[in-house]
Every structure is written in C-alpha cells, then in structure tokens.
Image: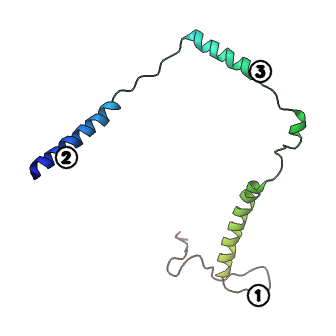
C-alpha cells in the first residue's frame, strides 16, 4: 500500500509539472505592423497631441517649480551635516592645543587606531 501511494504522489507531481511546463512552453512572437499602419498611428498621435487642451494660464501662476521644497533642502543639508559630524569626531580625538600660540602645532596627528596609523612609506 505504501509503495502504491508513493507512486501515485510521484505520478501526480510529474503530471502537474508537465502541465505547468507545457502551458508556458510557447510564446507567440509580437506581430509587426506594416509601414502604412505605423505612419497612420504616428499621424493620429500627433493630431491627438495637437488637439489636446492646453493648461489655463490662471492655474500655472501658483505652480512654479522654482522654489526649494523639503526634498531639495534635505539633499543639501544632510551631506553637509554628515561631513561636519565626521570632522568633529576626528577633531575630538586629536590632542588639545589650548596652550599653544602661533600658527599651528607640529605634534602627532592621530589618523587611526593604535598600530594602524598612517606612516610615510617612501624611503626619503
């Protein structure tokens, strides 16, 4: 009994797979249009576009797309804030220069975790 039920399941599964595969096995190629039909369709599209109603001038006064919306402001402010945050984080790891007067410091700059700092690789 177990052998016949397993055979039945395999037969039903293979029949279902064959039905699925055979139904999508043939796809008809797209039908090409003749030259006259294409030119007529283009002419009809041009005529429809010319006959389409134009927007009223009274409505276009309030629809100027020259302003700064929330997306434009975000696209400008977020990269600037991100770069400033990275700089402030780097600067917080540098040694304090409060007691130094003059042009600048020549102390050690911290460029990475200990053991992985930048060093000059040239033989000079």
Q: Disc 3 on helix, strand or loop?
A: helix
Q: Quadrant of residue 87?
A: bottom right
Distance between the Cα atoms at labels 1 and 2?
86 Å
Query: Which is more foreground, mark 1 or mark 2?
Result: 2
Residues at circles 1 and 2 in contact by the CB criterion of under 8 Å: no
Check residue 9 in the rendering and tell me which mark sits there, or answer none: 2
Question: Is tag 3's residue or tag 2's residue first in the polypeptide sequence?
Answer: 2
Q: Nearer the viewer, mark 3 or mark 2?
A: 2
User: Could you tell me which residue is drawn at 63 percent across and 16 percent down?
Assistant: 41
Please tell me whether mark 2 sits on a helix, a strand or a loop.
helix
Above or below for 124 versus 67: below
The residue depicted at 22 percent of the width and 40 percent of the height is 14
Q: CA distance from mark 1 to mark 3?
A: 75 Å
User: Which residue is more in the foreground, 80 or 49?
Assistant: 49
* Circles 3, 2 touching at the beta carbon (< 8 Å): no
Name which quarter of the figure residue 91 lies in.
bottom right
In this view, 86 is above or below 75 = below
Quarter of the rendering occupied by the C terminus? bottom right
* Quarter of the view holding residue 26: top left
The residue carrying mark 3 is 50
> Can you give x and y, in whole percent of width and height, for residue 4 in the image?
11, 47
Q: 38 or 103, which lies in front?
A: 38
Q: Secondary structure at mark 1?
A: loop
Q: Residue at x 66, y 76 (%)?
A: 89
The residue beneath circle 1 is 100
Classify residue 12 as left or right of residue 96: left
Question: Going from the N terminus, do you reach mark 1 or mark 3 first?
Answer: 3
């Amino acid at each position: 009994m177990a052998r016949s039920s397993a055979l039945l399941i395999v037969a039903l599964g293979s029949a279902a797979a064959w039905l699925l595969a055979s139904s999508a096995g043939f796809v008809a190629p797209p039908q090409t249009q003749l030259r006259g039909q294409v030119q007529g369709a283009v002419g009809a599209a041009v005529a429809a576009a010319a006959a389409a109603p134009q927007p009223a001038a009274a409505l276009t006064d309030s629809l100027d797309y020259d302003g700064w919306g929330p997306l434009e402001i975000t696209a400008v402010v977020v990269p600037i804030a991100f770069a400033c945050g990275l700089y402030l984080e780097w600067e917080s790891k540098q040694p304090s220069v409060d007691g130094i007067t003059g042009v600048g410091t020549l102390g050690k700059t911290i460029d990475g975790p200990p053991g992985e700092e930048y060093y000059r690789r040239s033989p000079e």
